[in-house]
Image (cartoon, grey):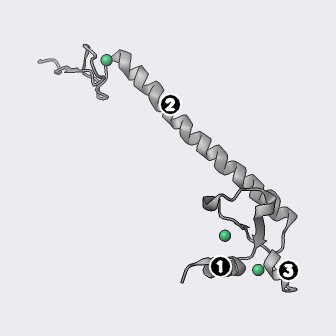
């Protein structure tokens, strides 16, 4: 029985041979695993950020349960989302002064009005 051909480790400059599916020798396999975990942690930080916006939004909407635009027109409509008065992409923040509770139809109106014609 011929033994499986060994290939050089994929890690640049490593003299070891390996028959592992990963292409790395034993030594570098664990190194690459650590790299991968480091990378995965980066994603979790992103999730944490997303989680905090959800918290801010939930807190804001429970303090302002009615659509603020409808209220201005003397109507009471349950707000279903929190709108950024100044979009985050435009330098806006998650600060309460930049937030508005809106119902879906008012939210659509605001965004349509802002669209360049
Ligand atoms: Zn190696
Ligand atoms: Zn509304
Ligand atoms: Zn919006």
Dot 2 falls on a residue whose secondary structure is helix
With 80 as the anchor, is 48 left or right in this view? left
| 105 lies above or below 34 | below
Residue in the image at 35% along x and 17% along y: 26
Category of crowding for the residue at label 2, using alpha-carbon neighbours closer than 10 angstroms: few (below 14), some (14–19), many (at least 20): few
Q: Please, what secondary structure does the residue beneath circle 3 have?
A: helix
At which x and y percent is residue 82? 73, 66
Q: Tell me the number on the disc at residue 71.
A: 3
Q: Position of residue 8 (x, y in %)?
A: 22, 20
Q: Is mark 3 within 8 Å of ligand 2?
A: no
Q: Does residue 30 appear to the left or right of 1 in the view shown?
A: right
Label 2 to label 1: alpha-carbon separation: 41 Å
Q: Mark 2 against mark 1, which lies toward the viewer?
A: 1
- Which residue corresponds to mark 1? 108
When the figure is inspected, residue 98 is found, relative to residue 28, above or below; the finding is: below
Secondary structure of the residue carrying tag 1 is helix
Residue furthest to the top in view is: 15
Q: Are marks 2 and 3 in contact (CB under 8 Å)?
A: no
| Residue at figure coordinates x 72%, y 80% from the top left | 106
Comes first in the chain, label 2 or label 1: 2
Rendered image quadrant of residue 70: bottom right
Q: Quadrant of the C terminus?
A: bottom right
Q: Which badge, 2 or 3, comes first in the chain's sequence? A: 2
State the residue position of label 2.
37
Q: Earlier in the sequence, mark 3 or mark 1?
A: 3
Graded by Cα atoms within 10 Å as few (under 14), some (14 to 19) or many (20 or more), the crowding at tag 1 reads: few
Decide if residue 80 is on the left or right side of residue 29.
right
Position of residue 48 measured from the top left corner of the image (x, y, whole percent): 66, 44
* Mark 2 vs mark 3: in front: 3
Task: Give the x, y percent position of residue 92.
Answer: 69, 59
**Residue 105 located left or right of residue 116:** right
């Amino acid at each position: 029985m011929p033994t499986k051909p060994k290939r050089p480790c994929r890690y640049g400059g490593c003299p070891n041979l390996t028959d592992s599916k990963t292409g790395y020798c034993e030594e570098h396999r664990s190194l690459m695993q650590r790299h991968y975990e480091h990378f995965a942690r980066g994603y979790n930080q992103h999730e944490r950020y997303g989680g905090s916006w959800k918290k801010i939004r939930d807190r804001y909407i429970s303090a302002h349960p009615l659509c603020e635009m409808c209220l201005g027109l003397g109507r009471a409509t349950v707000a279903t989302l929190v709108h950024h008065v100044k979009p985050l992409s435009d330098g806006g923040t998650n600060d309460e002064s930049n937030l508005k509770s809106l119902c879906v139809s008012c939210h659509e109106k605001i965004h349509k009005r802002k669209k360049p014609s």
